[in-house]
Amino acid sequence: MDNQSFAPIYEALVEFRRNRVVPFDVPGHKRGRGNPELVKLLGKQCVELDVNSMKPLDNLCHPISVIKEAEDLAAEAFGAAHAFLMVGGTTSAVQTMVLTASKKGEKIILPRNVHRSVINALVINGATPIYVNPDVDNRLGIALGMKISQVEKAIEENPDAVAILVNNPSYYGICSNLKRIVELAHEHNMLVLVDEAHGTHFYFGDDMPLSAMAAGADMSCVSMHKSGGSLTQSSILLTNSTVGPGYVRQVINLTQTTSASYLLLASLDISRRNLALRGKEAFAEVVEMAEYARTEINKIGDYYAYGSELINGDSIYDFDKTKLTVFTLDVGLAGIEVYDLLRDEYDIQMELGDIGNTLAYISIGDRMREIERLVSALYDIRRRFKRDRTGLFDHEYINPSVVMSPQEAFYAPKEEMIPIKETNGRICTEFVMSYPPGIPILAPGERITQEIIDYILYAKEKGCSMTGPEDPKIEYLNVIKEATIY
């Protein structure tokens, strides 16, 4: 790893800036001269580095120099055969994995509690999802990992499936037995794709859950902007030697922009270098802070900040100790209510607030004094706002009834703008989800039930940030015309 001290894209940008090149290309702000308010907001140095692809800076669509060097260094740092810098977020990387591994009519095995980007990819390419409905922790109400018996059953019933996709870790820190899933898949000539958006630190920290590349997965994607410290929207797609890099690049170029931001690319380059050189020490501190916070929050009473004690060797094969998720229902408050109180009353912005939990995303930029402030605020919220939990919903995940493939349903003839309370029994043609975490409550092709309707209305009432449908207020849904269902 001797070369990890280099950052080729960053170094090329520094050289480019030093040369004071006269710009007769895009972007039109011309190093900020045409937009002084933008310079005031972002700073002169930042705007001067918002440049277009050119020979000295390489081209992300077909990298041959500094971007190629940066990708090779990333592959080495992550223990992959190849790495691809992504400027469309891990959403773009996830879609690339699905579009690379499957095509129309082919089957792909996956848990239903996937990010919407997975199902979006199925809408695009027409592959058929074979859902493994995860177990749910009855107390916490959260979906767990893929049990090995569930994976074995899915493979046995669908031996013609081409790939298995795994969330590892989940938003809540739950990890599956990834190594065994890889072994099972490869025994049946199936690829393994891992949505590792929340697991960048697995590659650099000590005593972490097994990373996808170390487990032998064929493709994985890591959100460097989450726990890795790069700019928002930057990500890395990793592949093993079992996947042809030329074809992966072609798939990426089907959807990714031809005007890649060098601010994003440079942030990936610098962040990779930072983690390769200092990640072990940095993530040891992150774990220490998260474990301290868990201990202190659990001393308050009624809250439950859960951790490695959940591990059961199967559906919770391992746990990501950097994830600080706090179960709030025993305080008499939904997770989203605690999330809102922390922001509005204490100026603390959490990552997630759902029906039963709130999540603090602890990373390399946090400090112990901020952890103390969070613990103190949670103590005060319990003192001021605690109430009886009667009437609170107690689960996040509802097993769906899948009637049609996402692509079939998305493009099927629709009955538009049906009041949501009147859609019981109908087939949805669009997504409904809370974001974050971005896991669909409803996806195209699934039957709407009264339980789902009640959940959506309750989540709206509690203030969850709901997205997905055509109707921005989520009072109406589009459903399939009855004559279309067969």
Image: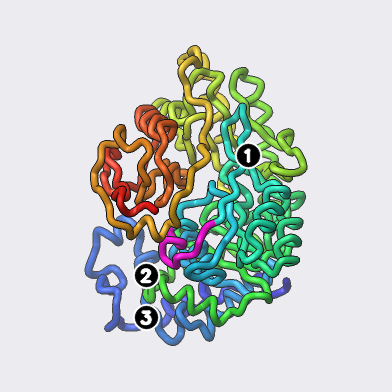
- Give the amino acid type for the residue marked by disc 3 in the picture: Arg
- Point out the frontmost of discs 3 and 1: 1
Q: As rendered, which of 163 and 72 lies closer to the eye? A: 163
Q: As rendered, which of 323 and 481 lies closer to the eye? A: 481
Residue 117: x, y in percent?
Answer: 46, 57
Residue at left offset 63%, top offset 60%: 158
Of the residues under marks 3 and 1, which one precedes in the sequence?
3
Tell me if mark 3 has few (under 14), some (14-19) or many (20+) residues whose alpha carbon lies within 10 angstroms of its own: few
Residue at left offset 43%, top offset 56%: 406
Q: Is residue 256 left or right of residue 483?
A: right
Question: From which residue to which does the magenta span run?
Answer: 120-129
Q: Main secondary structure of the magenta part?
A: helix
Q: Is residue 337 visible?
A: yes
Q: Quadrant of residue 33?
A: bottom left
Of the residues under marks 3 and 2, which one precedes in the sequence?
3
Q: Give how far apart the Cα atoms at labels 2 and 1 are.
A: 46 Å
Q: Quadrant of residue 242?
A: bottom right
Q: Is residue 368 above or below residue 96?
A: above
- Point out the frontmost of discs 2 and 1: 1
Q: Give how far apart the Cα atoms at labels 3 and 1 are.
A: 59 Å
Q: Of helix, strand and loop, which one carries label 3? A: loop
Q: Are marks 2 and 1 in contact (CB under 8 Å)?
A: no
The coloring applied to the image is rainbow
Residue on which disc 2 sits:
50
Residue at left offset 29%, top offset 77%: 26
Residue 88: x, y in percent?
Answer: 43, 64
Q: Is residue 356 magenta?
A: no
Q: Of helix, strand and loop, which one carries label 1? A: loop
Q: Is residue 334 left or right of residue 244?
A: left
Residue on which disc 3 sits:
20
Residue on which disc 1 sits:
135
